[in-house]
Amino acid sequence: MRRGVRRKVCLPMSKSSSIKPPAALEVAALNVYFGQGSERFQAVKDVSFKLEKGDSFGLVGESGSGKSTVLRAISGLIADWDGRISTDGVVVPRHRNKAFYRRMQMVFQDPYASLHPRHTIDGILSEPLKLHGIKDRDAKVLKALDDVGLGKSFRFRYPHQLSGGQRQRVAVARALMLEPEILLLDEPTSALDVSVQAEILNLLNDLRRERNLTFLMVTHDLAVVAHMCQKIAVMNRGEIVEVLSVEQMRKETPKEAYTKELLTASRGYDPDFFSVA
């Protein structure tokens, strides 16, 4: 009996291996407004940017440039906006649902104002779990406190019994209770003493690496951006005027005149930013 010849069959390469996953967060042609009628004011104008999973992206600019307004529009805290916001390729609905807040959370600027003064730390951390029907709350609260370097002894204290840095650690823990993929950071260290700012920034960096988080950070401090972000968008009067890397900013090689002015003004304020190689 003659043996058959085995033929080698070449299968086509799977296209799925070369398909790039959708951006973790994409903002396209975002406009944000305040006021009504003749007093309506456009605070953000045609802002667009994209963050891949695991990125840390910074928005910088002077006060009033629209940085924090962009974060508030993304998080759903501002209702009067148009454009498109999407996470993992899915367009975010105008009225945010629970699924959105399980995917994205925000850390606010002032830990003295963002924590309810009459709630214990246990109540503050448990609240998002209750709202989303998540069980094992005791274990999750204790783990969250450990993750931000506080420990169980802080569980039943009140915010006024904590320092500014400890309060911001609680704010970070609260943002992580639902295990989000994206954190919006609105100047998370600007209200803190210089001595504890680095501790909070290092904590955030460690958490990003451990959990593969995506960060969108607002700040006016170039040294903070250099420590936290890979890319930076410079905002002026509600618009993004330039997107560049931290290395480009340190080398002072921007293209736009406003970015050059911002760097020149920052030389006396953030000398460490320019001295780091």
Image (spheres, rainbow, N blue to C red):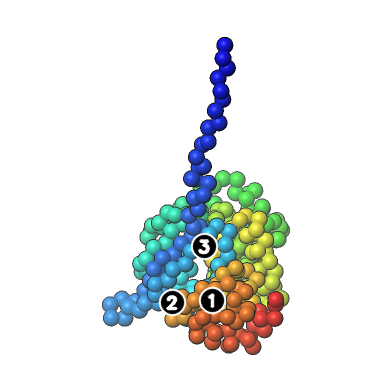
How far from the left and from the top, in percent, is residue 68? 49, 73
Q: Which mark is residue 239?
A: 2
How far from the left and from the top, in percent, is residue 44? 41, 75
**Residue at figure coordinates x 31%, y 76% from the top left:** 36
Which residue, as the protein is rendered here, is positioned at the far top?
A: 1
> Is residue 167 shown to the viewer in this render?
no
Q: Which mark is residue 51?
A: 3
Q: Nearer the viewer, residue 190 or 245?
A: 245
The vertical placement of 194 against 52, above or below, is below
Instruction: Give the foreground label among 3 and 1.
Output: 3
Mark 1, other Cα within 10 Å: few <14 / some 14–19 / many ≥20 = many
Disc 2 residue type (three-letter): Glu
Left or right? Give the position of 211 relative to 218. Answer: right
- Check disc 1 and report the residue beneath it: 60
Mark 2, other Cα within 10 Å: few <14 / some 14–19 / many ≥20 = many
Q: Nearer the viewer, residue 29 or 171?
A: 29
Disc 3 residue type (three-letter): Leu
**Alpha carbon distance from label 2 to label 3:** 18 Å
Q: Nearer the viewer, residue 111 or 249?
A: 249
